Amino acid sequence: MNDAHTYCSKDQIKDEFRAVLQMTIDYFKLFNLGDYWFRLSKWDPEKTEKYINEPENWELAEGVLREVLEEMGVSFIEVSDEAAFYGPKVDVQFKSIVGREETMSTVQLDFLAKERFGLKYVDETGTENNEVFVIHRAPLSTHERFIAFLIEHYAGKWPVWLAPVQVQFIPVSEKFLEGTKELAQKFAEAGVRFEIDSADETVGKKVRKAVENKVPYIIVVGERELSGEAMAVRMRDKDGETENINKDEFIERIVKEIGERK
């Protein structure tokens, strides 16, 4: 799951917080997101009505988070009066594709939960200890918001592994429709997402629609493709270049792309 809470002792905060930030970085790398930085969001000691009034815990928590960010060597800034009321947080700031700054993810350190929920544990000395800290993390924001961000970021040109339709099949005419379905089934069995455009339109118009929809691969299916010869595959990421390739070889290639998240 994206949202989670990690319960830890005071001496575990640093390692656990670092692990969450590293997971966040790994996620962004997976989605090829690079224009971001971290923000250490701190409290304002002049606004005790807004924040839990525990100066020592604020100093400890903010100090630990700062150390983690410095040791990881990531780009970050510090901003006062942006913390949660129960503790400091590290927000991940993004520059969107249109140049707008947004907070994408947040990792928060909560030192109030131990009192609100009566949290405690038995430590290594056998003593009951209530120094329990809670890390709230949502590395991918809310799912809906993250998907909206990706839609804007990719501008419809999804990587192959994320593309809703990875291969568009276009039969030359109705007489090739059943054969196209049989051919497409081979891709389905390999886990490839596809659509067959069976509309009563010209091949050229169907190809233009698929190009406008930024489908990664387009295959026009006629006699040659159904006879087992090499297929002519239009490649979106090669400026629409067409490559003649054997069916099994192409399936192997696209399955590899999906597996490697390309």
Image (cartoon, grey):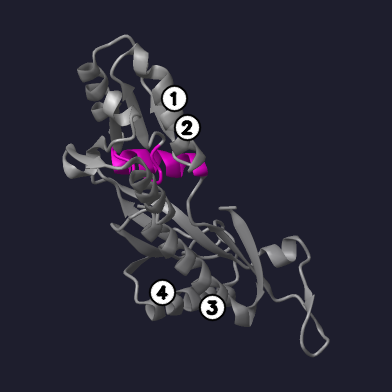
**CA gap, disc 4 to disc 2?**
49 Å
Magenta-span inclusion, residue 106: no
- Residue type of the residue flagged with mark 1: Lys
Percent of width and height locating residue 231: 27, 35
Amino acid residing under circle 4: Leu
Residue 147: say if magenta.
Answer: yes
- Residue stretch rendered in magenta on the structure: 143-163
In the rendered structure, which disc, 4 or 3, sits on the residue that comes first in sequence?
A: 3
Residue 213 appears in the figure = no
Regarding residue 78, the answer to whether it shows in the image is yes
Report how far apart the C-alphas of labels 4 and 1 lie in the structure. 53 Å
Q: Which mark is residue 14?
A: 3
Residue with the mark numbered 2? 185
Q: Of the two numbered discs 4 and 2 on the same chain, state the one appearing first in sequence.
A: 4
Point 39% across, 53% down: residue: 256
- SS type, badge 2: helix
Q: Position of residue 203 (x, y in %)?
A: 24, 18
Of circles 4 and 2, the one toward us is 2
Nearest to N terminus: mark 4 or mark 1? 4
Q: Quick one: SS at disc 4? A: helix
- In space, the residues marked 3 and 1 are separated at their CA atoms by 55 Å
Q: CA distance from mark 4 to mark 3?
A: 10 Å
Q: Nearer the viewer, mark 3 or mark 1?
A: 1
Q: Which mark is residue 69?
A: 4
Callout 3, which amino acid? Lys
Q: Is residue 173 left or right of residue 147?
A: left
Image quadrant in which you'd find residue 49:
bottom right
Closest to the camera, between mark 3 and mark 2, is 2
